[in-house]
Amino acid sequence: MLLTTFNCTALTGGAARALDSYAVAGLTDGDRAICAVGGVLLYFMFDADGTDAENVSAHPYKVRPNDYDTQGVWIEQLIDVSDAAYDESTWNGVTNVAPSKNAVFNSFGTLFPIHYERVTQPARSAVDTITIYDGTIICVNNKVFAVSSDMHLELNTNATWDTGTALNDAARAGHDYYVYACDNSGTLALLVSANSTYPTGYTAATSRKIGGFHCLCVAVGTIAGHTLTGFAQGEILPQSVWDLKHRPICEPAGMVWSDEARVWVDIYLASGTGVSTVSVNGGTISDTRDWMDFVDDFGAVKKQLLDDAEFQLIAAGSNEETNITGSADPGTTGGHVDTAARRMISNIGCEDCAGALWQWLRDQSYRPPATPGWEWYNLPGSKGSLYNYGGAAGDADAKLIAGGMWSSAAGCGSRCRDANYYRWFANASIGGRGRSRKL
């Protein structure tokens, strides 16, 4: 039977996130609760048969749910009583670390070395600020830290960065950054870093990557009705913010979350191939690859091509019925404008959805063949054949492409589709965009 761990910021009172607010009917014997109260971290287990009287004045605490009838009590737990350093004066096992009031519970951390819990998801709280909210609990270096007040990581502040030097808007443009929880000699340090492994001044053991975000490559300018209107270069893209509980199954760099499509999607058209397939600003766009190649490329990095409906949703807010300025192959990703000098960006921050390159979709379609007839067509790559109504040429097969290319003009848009190309067709005008389901 699966057990539930609850994250609380109060023991009693019945308010949201109070330990006594959880109904008995929804609890299972052995459920856990981690409570960060006044900078102290407390650990409880639910005793479904318990009848103890409520006591929150002397350890071990006992808390009855508000709807307690005849049984069911939360009992505070003592971790690692065999520790020679155990002393009843420190019964709760918690060291309160002033002045930040972030608590570290050493013994608990050895039992739950990868624990991460939060009530409120980290988010962009200002144009250049990521906030880690009160109630977040993180295990680092076998120590559990509780964030007892909102912590604002302002990107123009030197102390926010692992290097001690803030990066300005231009330097941050089009790049991914990572949020680390660090064990600074027993005190929690939350830092932003450009390093994807561990931050400067720490090791893999003394730090833990808990989230990240992407910064806008080029200012959006004013676009009436657009979610990102007025966003400046280097600002945090709101939908790119991820953490350990809200992220794709693949690496989250260069991606944004679509609430409408319920998928993580690449900000940029794909660059690279195979395990080197990435979504990066300024990357050389991968093209002249057939549908099957792109399927393999994205599969190598735990992604897939978008489907028809997903593309329509993630591309909403992009330029409609226009193509890229200059009407030529852009060659590289990101920051482009159309023939009306409008930024080619969707409401969630996807670049070049329409009017740059066509993009393969997962969807199957059909095209009238030159010579109809049911026959096998030997697909390239010696990995099998396709039986369809396209005769010897096999050309009844079609995979949808979306968005329009650099010269499609009024044909371009979030709902633009072409059903004229079979899966083994490759052309410089067709690229791909990856998506991933949520972890």
Image (cartoon, helix red, strand yellow):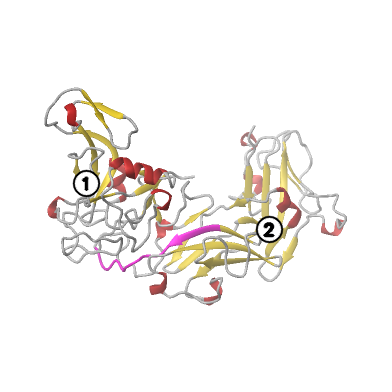
Mark earlier in primary sequence (1, 2): 2
Q: Nearer the viewer, residue 233 or 51?
A: 233
**Residue 202 seen by the camera:** yes
Q: CA distance from mark 1 to mark 2?
A: 49 Å
Q: Amino acid at mark 2?
A: Asn
Residue 187: horizontal and vertical position, in percent? 68, 66
Q: Position of residue 337 (x, y in %)?
A: 23, 64
Q: Give yes or no for residue 222 being in the magenta stretch.
A: yes
Q: Are marks 1 and 2 in contact (CB under 8 Å)?
A: no
- Magenta residues span 210-223
Residue at image point 56% right, 75% down: 159
Question: Which residue is disc 2 drawn over?
Answer: 141
The residue sitting at the front extreme is 382
Quarter of the image for residue 2 reads top right
Badge 1 density bin: few <14, some 14–19, many ≥20, Cα 10 Å: some
In the rendered image, residue 239, in percent from the top left (x then y), is placed at 40, 56
Determine which residue is flagged by label 1.
415
Of the two numbered discs 1 and 2 in the rendering, the one whose residue sits closer to the viewer: 2
Q: Amino acid at mark 1?
A: Arg
Numbered tag placed on residue 374 in the rendering: none
Q: Is residue 207 left or right of residue 321?
A: right
The residue closer to the viewer here, 267 or 83, is: 267
Q: How many marks?
A: 2
Asked whether the viewer can see residue 306, the reply is: no
Given the current orientation, which residue lies at the most extreme top position?
374
**85 vs 386: above or below:** below
Q: Secondary structure at mark 1?
A: loop
Identify the element where label 2 is drawn. loop
From the top left corner, tell me how far across and down residue 9 is, in percent. Answer: 64, 54
- For the point 86% across and 56% down, the residue is 88
